[in-house]
Image: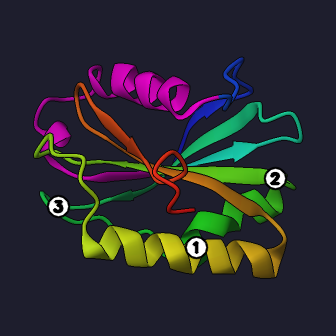
Amino acid sequence: MILLENTRLYATHPEVIARALQRWFLRIDPLERDQEHGFVLILDVRNRVKVVDVISIGILNASILHPREVYRRAITLGAASIVIAHNHPSNDCTPSDEDCQITNLLVEAGRVVGIELLDHIIFSRKEFYSFREQHHI
């Protein structure tokens, strides 16, 4: 489900992306905020966000970020790179073991298809965690 298209948003820093997603998240139904949402941000060669795609709506503590779904629209739109993100309804942005495993898998999948995964951002209402800033990508 495409959330945004042809934005003026540039993925210059993880905080820019996290704050934009946090603002959007405040606008959705409060009941849906208790579910994890997975996003892929499709970037052009200048790191402008062309599309924000909601690729998964999960449950309280899980969301599926499968490589096929993550890269499907990115390949179709000729993405230069992508950023993935998901929320933690618990407000604790510490990545789980599963978050780390899927990040590594998506980095490898990006190498295969030629679309670099620039970052994986976990966000809550007020905080965020960037795998790139923490040198995990």
User: Residue 108: percent from the left, percent from the top?
Assistant: 66, 80
Q: Mark 2 vs mark 1: give the one in front.
A: 1
Give left or right: position of 60 versus 115. Answer: left
Q: Earlier in the sequence, mark 3 or mark 2?
A: 3
Q: Amino acid at mark 1?
A: Leu
**For the residue carrying disc 1, how many other residues have a C-alpha within 10 Å: few (<14), some (14-19), or many (20+)?**
many
Under mark 2, the amino acid is Ala
- Please tell me whether residue 137 belongs to the stretch shown in magenta: no
Query: Which range of residues does the magenta coloring cover?
Result: 13-38
- In three-dimensional space, the C-alpha distance between marks 3 and 2, rounded to whole angstroms, equals 29 Å
Residue displayed at 54% across by 24% down: 16
Q: Which residue is mark 1?
A: 106
Q: Disc 3 and disc 1: Cα gap in Å?
A: 21 Å
Looking at the picture, tell me which residue is in the foreground, 92 or 82: 92
Q: Is residue 33 above or below residue 118?
A: above
Front-most of residues 32 and 129: 129
Which element is circle 3 on? loop
**Percent coordinates x, y for residue 99 in the rendering:** 35, 68
User: What amino acid is found at the position of numbered circle 3 in the picture?
Assistant: Ile
Residue to which mark 2 is pinned = 79
Left of 68 or right of it: where is 131? left
Look at mark 3 in the image and give the residue it sits on: 59
Q: Percent x, y for residue 33?
A: 18, 38
Q: Is residue 47 above or below residue 62?
A: above
